Image (cartoon, grey):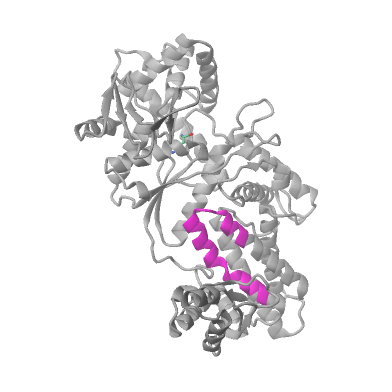
Amino acid sequence: MGDLAGTLGTACADAFEAIGLDRKWGAVRRSDRPELADFQCNGAMGAAKSAGRVPRDVAGEVAERLAGHAAIASCEVAGPGFLNIRVTEGALTARAEAVRAEDMAGAEKVADAERVLIDFGGPNVAKPMHVGHLRSAVIGDTLQRVLRFLGDDTVSDTHLGDWGLQMGHLVTELYDEQPELIYFDAEYTGPYPEDPPVTIDDLGRLYPQASAKAKADEARNERSQQAVAELQAGRPGYRALLKHFINVSVAALKQDYAFLNVSFDLWKGESDVDHLIPGLVEDFKARGLAREDDGAVIVDIAREGENVPVEGKDGKVKLKNAMPPIMLVNSRGGTGYHTTDLATILDRMQMEHPPQRMLYVVDQRQALHFEQVFRAAGKAGLFPTDKMEHIGFGTVNGPDGKPFKTREGGVLRLADLNGMALEEAEKKITEGGRLPEDMGHEERDAVAAAVALAALRFADLQNTRTTNYIFDLERFTSFEGKTGPYLLYAAVRIKSLLRRAEEEGHAPGAIRVESEAERALVLALDGFGHALTGTREKRMPHILCEHIYNLAQAFSAFYGAHPIAAEKDADTRASRLGLCEAVLKQLETGLDLIGIKVPERM
Ligand code: ARG
């Protein structure tokens, strides 16, 4: 069953069409004035203008045709020609029942489903993840959940950063500590030991150590560069080390991601596509798409009107609308970030079911990089430029408005962030004295983890993705306000209410939508599908978050307005319990789509 907004939209479009006007004028949305109407249609003004008619006359004719529609209780013309529509109790009741009964809790699959590859996460081997990686993980994972729910065929890839200078740092730093390791013997060709020579703590120590030295000492940096070049050229010992580094890293990453309820279909990395690079470069050259410059291989991607030289007042020539070319191969023969991204596209097109679209959920600050990659991919016919989207996002800032750092001034590791959130969540659930007394340790820990997860994910997702936000754990974990824990509490409250009613022998029954609070609640439920398609079309999870929050608030108002389990009239009680079931179903579905798990009680 479709939602009310859609049903009314079709009815209005039919009415406009019947009086010889375009269907597009029939668009319907929730009313700005809920005391006057449930829905409104503002099309009569535009339609009248286009037809040279009087707006109120057009609105009147449409209203006349709408009268008698099964879902419409009344349709009034207001002001210059607005149509104010109120829906029938029967239509609201049917909607509430549909939400309760349908698998998708009132939403529907989209008609234009696609096979979409979602590239998100993007952690780097050895380098700790920072809060920017948190954003990519939760936004990407939410989009993956929503698209999949709506019928898209998604495949997600974490695209590990495992091919850059950091690998050279690790190799050389490990050599300095343990030069006797077999991996450093250039004569030896394998087999190599199965057990890794390092732990995740070693990696966490070796990388910053090496990177600090390399910054201070050019010769030390050169050794790392040399090691990368040898690694990329295929030196067996270094390749074996690379595999160990990746495995050790991935095991730790999986833990951090599991805490955030984030998952990937593929755990591929930059190093997985290195064998495709020589062919890719040859192909670009052979087809005249690349040029050689001082040993480097360059691809120009500027379009007409870009890179226009203009002479400034100071007499210096600058480029207007600059679009720098990309370097496929540098003068040392090395390849970088652009090249691995292009080779990765090639690799993805070799999948059994190649994607029709690719989304890259990465920090807004990489916008130029993706613009370049998309253009180069389009130019070479690897993938159409207009089917690749960079889903950028803003930074997570500290109270000072600058990108969030630890007290010591370093990047905050995701694992530490998770730990901090857990600690704060434990504090909050203890402080409130809200946990049932018979709750054992295990259940308590699970509740704390659920609160921490809800806090982190909702705090991030509720913001318009492109804006920056301030990291404030104290606020995120609060049970009051627009927070994840507030939503968890709302869902858990309904669960316990239904449980208690059941214990008292009160079963949910047929829903009847009667009071204003009930109407408002069902109208809130009706917005789910629209919120989901909006989230999908704009790639903006905050639209879904907004819906979930509104629903929780409408439920609170309903809960405050009426007795539910304590209601004396049996049919009314059964109806209200039925409504509770519908709300719980959609709330849990919605929370699951933003990656939040609801405990049974808390
Ligand atoms: N590893 C990169 C970073 O930390 C992000 C990778 C994003 N994905 C991509 N296909 N380039 O900045």
Residue shown at 39%/52% (left/top)?
A: 116
Q: Quadrant of the C terminus?
A: bottom right
Q: Is residue 314 above or below residue 485?
A: above
Q: Quadrant of residue 236?
A: top left
Residue 34 position within the rendered picture, expressed as x and y whole percent measured from the top left: 68, 73
Residue 210 position within the rendered picture, expressed as x and y whole percent measured from the top left: 51, 17
Residue 157 position within the rendered picture, expressed as x and y whole percent measured from the top left: 41, 44
**Closer to us: 175 or 579:** 579
**Closer to us: 251 or 5:** 5
Going by the image, does 76 lie left or right of 474? left
**Start-end of magenta stretch:** 519-547
What main secondary structure does the magenta stretch of the protein show? Answer: helix
Q: Quadrant of ligand 1?
A: top left
Going by the image, does 345 lie left or right of 513? left
Going by the image, does 206 lie left or right of 550? left
| Residue 268 seen | no
Q: Residue furthest bottom?
A: 68
**Closer to us: 152 or 602:** 152
Residue shown at 53%/53% (left/top)?
A: 540
User: Was residue 546 drawn as part of the magenta stretch in this picture?
Assistant: yes
